[in-house]
Each structure stands twice: as C-alpha cells, then as structure tokens.
C-alpha cells in the first residue's frame, strides 16, 4: 500500500552526513521475544500429556494384539469333552467320537488327549502325584478347523451325540465373546484416557497462549499500529507454540518409546514369578510391533499439531479482544 | 492554509484522485455511557495538506487521532479514510489501511526487545520486505534524526528525546500517505524540535498529509499551516 519505489525518491538529503561505510547485514531480533513466553512449564505439560497418551496407546495396542492372537487361536479349534458315565467304555467312546469328527467337512486335524494328558490338565487343581484311576476324569478331544471352510456345528453335534451321548461340543464362543468384550472395554477406556489427555492439553495450551498474549500485549498493539495483520502476528506466536509443542511431544513420546523398548527386558526380570507368568500369558512378550512405534510417533506429531491448533485458535480470539 | 497539489509531485494516478484522505461527517464519540467527548465533527483532510491539531488538555485531541488511526470507532456519523467507509472495513482491510498511516504517540510505543534500528524498520518488516532492501533508508533516517550512533541501542537505555525521535522515524520511514503525530516535539530541545518539524515538512512536500497534535504555540508559529482547534468537543477549522 506504500508508494512505489519510483515515487519514493530521497526523503531527506544527508549531504556529508550520509554514512560512507556500506551497511552490513543485521541479525534481526524475533518479533516476539522467546523469553516472554513461559515455555518451560508448557513443554513439561505437553511432555507429560504425550507420555500418558503414548503409554495408553501402547498398552491398548499390546492388549488388542494379544487378544486378537488369542481369539484367532481359540476360534480355530473346537473342544469335545467326553464324560465318563456308568455302563459305557470311555475309551471306545473317545475313538468313536474322533472317527465321527474326522469325517466332518471343515475339520483338518483331530487329536484325542490320552488319559495321562487329561490328568495333567487337572494338575493345577488337584496337584501332581495323584492317582486318577478311580476318578471319572473326562477326556478331551481337540479338533483343528480348516480356515475358510464353514463348519456345520449342528451336524457335528448330532454326529458326536450319536457316537457318545455323554460327549459335548464346545466351540469356545463364550470365551471369544468374553475376550471381545474385554478388548472392547480396554480400547474404550484407552480412548477415554486419550480424550482426557487431549482436552487437558488443549486447555493447558489455551491458558499458556492467553498468558503469553497478555505478557506481549504491548508488542501486539505496536504491530497493529505499524499495519501488521492478525495473520502475521498470529504466525509469529504460533512458531513458538509449535516449537514448544514439538519439544514436549518429542520428550514425552520418546520416553514412552524407551519404556516400551525396554519393557521386554523388564518383563524377563519377572519371568518365572507367578505375576510375570500371568502377564506373559495375557500379554505375550510385552514387545510393541514396529507399527506400534509408528503409531506413537504419529501421536506425538498429532499432539504437537493440537498444541499449535489450540494456540492458533486462542491467538485469533485474543487478537480480536486486543483490537 | 490548505496545501495545494504540486504539479510536479510524483504521485500515482490513484493518489491524485484521492482529494481528501479523511472525511468526517457528523461524527460523535463517547466512551461507554459517558458524555459525548467529540461532537458533530465535520471536516476533511485534503491529500498533501499540513495541519496542526490543537486545543486545551482533555479536549479530545488524542481521541480524534485514535479515530483517524482506526483504533476507535465513532459512536455516530460517517468516517471515510482514503475513500473507504471505515464502518464497512474488515480487520485485514484495516491493517492494510494502517500501512498507509504513520502515527507518533505520546508514549512512543517502542518495542524494548528490539534495537532502535529494528524499531524504525518495523513498518517495512511487517510487509515482508527483505532487510537488505530498506537497510540504507533506515540508516539514513536514523542519522537525520540524530540517532546514527544509537541505532544498536535498546529503547530502555534511550533518553526520552531519543525515544521520541525513534518513534517519529518509525512513523515516517515508510513515507505514509497520512502522518498523525501526538505532541511529537514534547520531549526535545527547540533546535531538535525545529529539525523534526523540517522532517515533517519534507514529508508533506513529498505528498504526505500531516496532522500534528500539539500545545506548542512556538512550534505552530514556525510554519504557516491550517489549524484544527478542538474546544468543548467541537472542531473549529482555521484555514
């Protein structure tokens, strides 16, 4: 909007006062002084929030992966239990049921557990060294299903009942349903925590931005006086907040990634203990897959972006108030 | 005495058509629910004109300057700036119009974290110009206002007079179409006051409309110019 260069000419003639030494390039001070923004506290808040968000996401990913593995393993098998009843030879019933199952389309492998193997399954409850000869221990037959081939469960049940009336078929549906609900609940809880973390981050950043704008109000007013638009002013503040958000995000996300990186080693310290074994059974090796680390990195960038976005929103609202 | 448009003045066609840079029609201003402090203002500021704005303390000179600078909106009436009805302007348009106006405020409003050079160069910087393109111009102007040796000093170590000269330099560096100055010679000695007045006159000769708000009769007597006198909220114009 200022006059063109042709129109400018010389505003005043300095004569001999004109400096003879060529002007040197100058390192210009930032429009918004870095020290005027309470950055350290904001970096700490963003770092903590990113850490919490990353731990939550990582845990949800671990549980989901383990649950999916469990589900696929359990869903690819069915179990037939043959109970001992008076007047029937259980060994013959087991063979008859196994034969009936082998002819059923969709089943690729049938493995009847021996009496000794069935007894071993009861060891955790009854202890070792107990004679099971006098006990009516039920026998278990595991059938592996062919992936992609539908199994006619009603037909299988009919055949199994015909072979041995005391036999029952368990397709693990109840287990799978329970597993699904547990995984679903974990994901929902994780998403809830993430939402809280993001909302807290937005609120913290908004307060920090308002504080920074209040501290720099004289600068904003002068920038308005010299014709700077809101976009120009906001961009200078935004650079600070984006940098602070990235710093905090990298610190929090980096620490969370280290935690997951070392979690396998930490888990190995506890292996052999009851707690360690239970966790290993539930969550596997505690190791996050490469996609998991990628998700954490994306989340870190996302939190930095949320910091910048909420800062920008507050900046424009505050600039409206100042003008 | 309204300044005539000099035939040899190197002005663009657009500027020549803007005969009045400012036009006030029945403008009134009140703060909140208080009394009207400016009433029925009707005047024009022709392009390339030079005028003093004067009046007793509390007459509303600073408020009138703020209206002219678009940092206040009138309570009533029509304000036209460079042919634009200011009530219809959006924020971006106001920012663009402000780039055509230079203002010197009584409290200087220099940025303490920037050197004198950077403060003066700020109007160029916010328009995105390269530092190398305006460096010579800024240094020349700082020499002219006697701040050649202080261009790397920060405002907190400048005297009141030096701050005032830096504020004036910042207001005139981009050669605005309209210059508003609120008591621009209040903190300087008479010799420097005359030098600064000469700067304003030079700027006016190059095409800028100048309004200087002052109490200083001596300053006004040094240059024959139109006088706008505010008294009891009303404006009297002496050509």
Image (tube, rainbow, N blue to C red):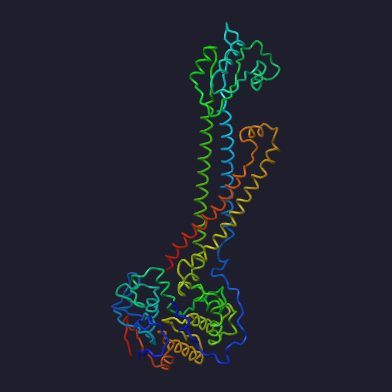
Is residue B212 in view from this perspective? no
Q: x%, y% of residue B48?
A: 39, 86
Q: Quadrant of residue B35?
A: bottom left
Of residues B208 and B163, which is closer to you in this image? Answer: B208
Quadrant (top left, top right, bottom left, bottom right) of the C terminus of chain A? bottom left
Q: x%, y% of residue B130?
A: 54, 75
Which residue: 45% across, 69% down? A229
Which residue: 60% across, 51% down? A252
In the displayed structure, would residue A223 be above or below residue B183? above
Is residue A257 in view from this perspective? yes
Q: Is residue B166 left or right of residue B235?
A: right
Q: x%, y% of residue A273?
A: 69, 32
In the displayed structure, would residue B153 be above or below residue A181? below
Quadrant (top left, top right, bottom left, bottom right) of the N terminus of chain A? bottom left
In the displayed structure, would residue A323 be above or below residue B205? above
Of residues A114 and B143, which is closer to you in this image? Answer: A114
Q: x%, y% of residue B229?
A: 35, 86
Which residue: 48% across, 72% down? A223
Which residue: 50% across, 82% down? B169
Q: Check the image and name the residue furthest to the top.
A: A87
Of residues B122 and A202, which is closer to you in this image? Answer: B122
Q: Quadrant of residue A124?
A: top right
Q: How many numbered discs sit on the rendered protein?
A: 0
Q: Is residue B235 left or right of residue A3?
A: left
Q: Quadrant of residue B89?
A: bottom left
């Amino acid at each position: 909007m200022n006059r063109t260069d042709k129109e400018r000419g010389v505003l005043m003639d300095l004569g001999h006062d004109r400096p003879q030494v060529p002007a040197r390039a100058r390192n210009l001070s930032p429009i918004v002084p870095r020290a005027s923004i309470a950055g350290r506290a904001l970096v700490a808040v963003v770092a903590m929030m990113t850490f919490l968000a990353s731990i939550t996401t990582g845990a949800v990913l671990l549980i989901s992966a383990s649950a999916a593995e469990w589900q696929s393993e359990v869903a690819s098998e069915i179990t037939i239990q043959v109970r001992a009843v008076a007047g029937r030879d259980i060994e013959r019933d087991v063979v008859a049921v196994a034969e009936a199952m082998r002819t059923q389309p969709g089943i690729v492998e049938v493995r009847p557990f021996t009496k000794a193997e069935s007894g071993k399954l009861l060891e955790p409850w009854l202890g070792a060294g107990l004679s099971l000869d006098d006990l009516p221990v039920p026998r278990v037959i595991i059938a592996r299903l062919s992936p992609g081939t539908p199994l006619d469960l009603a037909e299988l049940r009919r055949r199994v009942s015909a072979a041995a009336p005391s036999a029952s078929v368990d397709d693990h549906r109840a287990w799978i349903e329970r597993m699904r609900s547990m995984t679903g609940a974990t994901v929902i809880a994780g998403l809830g925590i993430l939402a809280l973390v993001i909302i807290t981050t937005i609120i913290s950043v908004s307060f920090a931005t308002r504080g920074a704008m209040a501290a720099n109000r004289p600068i904003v007013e002068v920038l308005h006086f010299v014709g700077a638009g809101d976009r120009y002013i906001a961009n200078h503040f935004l650079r600070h907040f984006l940098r602070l958000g990235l710093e905090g995000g990298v610190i929090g996300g980096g620490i969370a990634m280290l935690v997951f990186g070392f979690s396998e080693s930490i888990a190995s310290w506890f292996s052999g203990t009851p707690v360690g074994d239970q966790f290993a059974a539930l969550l596997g090796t505690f190791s996050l897959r490469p996609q998991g680390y990628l998700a954490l990195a994306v989340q870190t960038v996302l939190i930095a972006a949320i910091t910048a976005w909420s800062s920008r929103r507050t900046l424009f609202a505050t600039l409206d108030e100042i003008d | 005495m309204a300044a005539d448009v000099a035939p040899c003045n190197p002005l663009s066609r657009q500027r020549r058509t803007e005969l009045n840079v400012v036009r006030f029609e029945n403008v009134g201003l009140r703060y909140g629910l208080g009394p009207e402090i400016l009433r029925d203002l009707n005047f024009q500021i022709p392009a390339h004109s030079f005028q003093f704005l004067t009046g007793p303390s509390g007459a509303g000179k600073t408020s009138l300057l703020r209206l002219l600078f678009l940092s206040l909106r009138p309570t009533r009436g029509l304000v036209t700036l460079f042919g634009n009805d200011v009530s219809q302007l959006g924020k971006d348009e106001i920012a663009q119009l402000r780039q055509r106006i230079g203002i010197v405020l009584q409290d200087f409003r220099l940025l303490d974290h920037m050197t004198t050079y950077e403060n003066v160069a700020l109007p160029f910087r916010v328009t995105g110009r390269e530092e190398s393109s305006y460096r010579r111009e800024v240094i020349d102007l700082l020499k002219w206002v006697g701040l050649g040796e202080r261009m790397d000093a920060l405002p907190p170590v400048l005297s009141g007079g030096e701050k005032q000269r830096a504020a004036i330099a910042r207001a005139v560096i981009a050669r605005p179409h309209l210059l508003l100055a609120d008591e621009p010679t209040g903190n300087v000695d008479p010799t420097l006051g005359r030098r600064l007045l000469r700067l304003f006159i030079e700027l006016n000769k190059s095409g800028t409309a100048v309004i200087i708000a002052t109490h200083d009769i001596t300053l006004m007597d040094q240059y024959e110019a139109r006088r706008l006198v505010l008294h009891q909220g009303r404006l009297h114009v002496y050509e």
